[in-house]
Image (cartoon, rainbow, N blue to C red):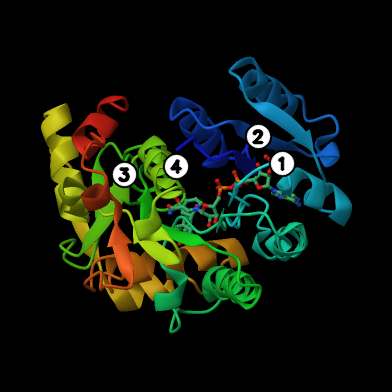
């Protein structure tokens, strides 16, 4: 069967750009929304043009212009939205409700993948304030999708390696500490880390797969199910240097929210669920979910020692 036509909305974003590349790499006619609002953001425009040079089609459309979204959606079979949900970038998850309206009106879409790509928001009903907003908003979008009977797939991608691995799971930095590392509790809680390009590869593989229709796909590659202590040990092996380790209790970690700005508090909450509660690995993937590495064993996903090599 011929490859479905894909529209990426949010295509110049951190995960969005990788979705565009993976869609092209897997042979899908690939369309990327070009928003007039990018104005003088020359980096975004140049990135869009680089996609065009690689065979993508740019489609003008704005979230401020419903008709333009309907027209853009009518050109394709599958829509993938990678709308920003990160508080120190431009968090705009609820804007997707406009895209849901356009998809509903266009009526031609065979699969819609909303912007999720993290913890499963359906499992985060008890998440701490204020970080719970991330999940509450994603659930509002899911509700709109399901009420409109739009065929969908939700991708729970666990931790983007770039934000969680080279910093040895520390907050507010993206590079490794040189002398000492702070462990969350005993540092033995298992999390899941995935290379961002692999997330895009797996996502594109799901869009034409009947097994993932109206399902949540978890990306949980077995060798990337690791504890913080295992990440630290991997790093120490690569550098041949031991780090001083100290531990922060859950009480002290949560207390570190006091007096900090909203964005920091969101991060603390998210890190707490990941590294103290183990929210990414404390459940079996039942028959209402699928696991990507199992569905697509042909993907040679990047292991985290490989990912870390670049930072040595
Ligand atoms: P970015 O911050 O890179 O933003 C992605 C795109 O959102 C932008 O490129 C832009 O699209 C679009 N956008 C932002 N603001 C607006 C606006 N006002 N109007 C229209 N479009 C807008 O997103 P990320 O890649 O960081 O995050 C994407 C998803 O991944 C989110 O759901 C987030 O929660 C999740 N995530 C998960 C992580 C993990 O570790 N699991 C880590 C980081 C994010 P355009 O290209 O058209 O300009
Ligand atoms: C990533 C981050 C890194 C926050 C998710 C604060 C939604 C998810 C794993 O993207 O707040 O330093 O699941 O100081 O469902 C951010 C968020 C990571 C940035 C988490 C995310 C993960 C969002 C920080 C920091 C490295």
Give how far apart the Cα atoms at labels 4 and 1 are.
18 Å
Does the image show residue 244?
no
Residue at 27 percent of width and 71 percent of height:
276
* Mark 3 CB lies closer than 8 A to ligand 2: no
Does the image show residue 165?
yes
Residue at 41 percent of width and 40 percent of height:
196
The residue that label 3 is drawn on is 165
Give how far apart the Cα atoms at labels 1 and 2 are.
8 Å
- Quarter in which the N terminus is drawn: top left
Q: Position of residue 178 (x, y in %)?
A: 28, 36
Pointers 4 and 1 in contact (C-beta within 8 Å): no
The residue that label 2 is drawn on is 31
Q: Alpha-carbon neighbours of circle 3 within 10 Å: few (<14), some, or many (≥20)?
A: many
Give how far apart the Cα atoms at labels 1 and 3 are.
38 Å
Residue at 55 percent of width and 63 percent of height:
151
Near-viewer residue (18 or 239): 18
Pointers 2 and 3 in contact (C-beta within 8 Å): no
The residue that label 4 is drawn on is 204
Q: Residue 75: give its label.
A: 1
Give how far apart the Cα atoms at labels 2 and 3 are.
32 Å
Mark sitting earlier along the chain (1/3): 1
Pointers 1 and 2 in contact (C-beta within 8 Å): yes
- Is residue 217 left or right of 222 when viewed as pictured? right
* Mark 2 CB lies closer than 8 A to ligand 1: no
Q: Alpha-carbon neighbours of circle 1 within 10 Å: few (<14), some, or many (≥20)?
A: some
Q: Secondary structure at mark 1?
A: loop
């Amino acid at each position: 069967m011929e490859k479905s036509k894909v529209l990426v909305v949010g295509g110049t974003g951190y995960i969005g750009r990788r979705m565009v590349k993976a869609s092209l790499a897997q042979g899908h006619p690939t369309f990327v929304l070009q928003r007039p609002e990018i104005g003088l953001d020359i980096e975004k425009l140049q990135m869009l043009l680089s996609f065009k040079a690689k065979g993508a089609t740019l489609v003008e459309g704005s979230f401020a212009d419903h008709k333009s979204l309907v027209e853009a959606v009518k050109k394709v079979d599958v829509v993938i939205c990678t709308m920003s949900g990160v508080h120190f970038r431009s968090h705009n998850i609820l804007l997707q409700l406009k895209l849901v309206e356009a998809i509903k009106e266009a009526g031609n879409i065979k699969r819609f993948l909303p912007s999720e790509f993290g913890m499963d928001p359906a499992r985060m009903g008890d998440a701490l304030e204020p970080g719970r907003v991330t999940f509450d908003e994603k659930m509002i979008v899911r509700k709109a999708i399901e009420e409109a009977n739009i065929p969908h797939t939700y991708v729970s991608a666990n931790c983007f390696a770039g934000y969680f691995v080279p910093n040895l799971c520390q907050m507010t930095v993206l590079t490794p500490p040189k002398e000492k590392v702070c462990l969350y509790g005993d540092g033995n809680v298992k999390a899941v880390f995935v290379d961002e390009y692999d997330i895009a590869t797996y996502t594109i593989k799901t869009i034409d797969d009947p097994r993932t229709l109206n399902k949540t796909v978890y990306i949980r590659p077995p060798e990337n199910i690791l504890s913080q202590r295992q990440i630290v040990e991997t790093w120490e092996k690569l550098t041949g240097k031991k780090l001083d380790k100290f531990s922060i209790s859950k009480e002290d970690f949560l207390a570190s929210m006091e007096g900090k700005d909203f964005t920091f508090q969101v991060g603390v909450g998210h890190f707490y669920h990941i590294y103290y509660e183990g929210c990414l690995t404390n459940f079996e993937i039942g028959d209402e979910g699928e696991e990507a590495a199992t569905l697509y064993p042909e993907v040679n996903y990047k292991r985290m020692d490989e990912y870390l090599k670049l930072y040595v």
